Image (spheres, grey):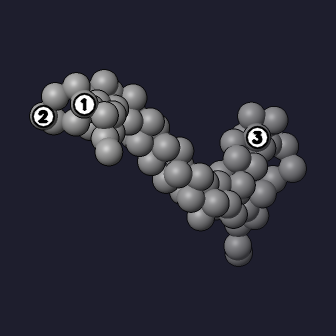
Amino acid sequence: MARRVGTGNESWLTRAVMAVFAFVRYAEFEILFFLFFAIAFLLFKDLTSRPEYNQILVKKPGGAEFWP
């Protein structure tokens, strides 16, 4: 005799958790895609906000002259 998987009397918390897991299984690629770009953006923003990074683009190594 097979057991019945879903009974009708699950609590609202159980149903909510199962719905979240179903959504994550369904949208796994999109979630990972968004996380990849969010992390890449934060790393790039952190790296480019450092003063030594900006000085490379502005100052000439030999002195206070402007670029030709």
Residue 62 position in % (x across, y down): 12, 34
Dividing the picture into quarters, in which one does residue 10 lie? Answer: top right
- Classify 65 as above or below 29: above
Residue 33 to residue 56: above or below? below
**Which of the two marks, 1 or 3, is nearer to us in this view?**
1
> Residue 16 has which mark?
3
Q: CA distance from mark 2 to mark 3?
A: 64 Å
Residue at screen point 49% across, 53% down? 36
- What's the amino acid at mark 1? Glu
Numbered disc 3: secondary structure? helix
Q: CA distance from mark 1 to mark 3?
A: 64 Å
Residue to which mark 2 is pinned: 62
Q: Nearer the viewer, mark 2 or mark 3?
A: 2
Residue type, mark 3 in image: Ala
Q: Name the residue: 31% across, 34% down.
A: 66
First in residue order: circle 2 vs circle 3: 3
Residue on which the image places disc 1: 65
Toward the right, the furthest residue is: 8
- Could you tell whether 42 is left or right of 8 in the image? left
Asked if marks 1 and 3 touch (Cβ < 8 Å), the reply is no
Residue furthest left as drawn: 62
Classify residue 12 by image quadrant.
top right
Q: Residue at x 15, y 36 (%)?
A: 61
Q: Is residue 28 left or right of residue 63?
A: right
Q: Nearer the viewer, residue 38 or 8?
A: 38
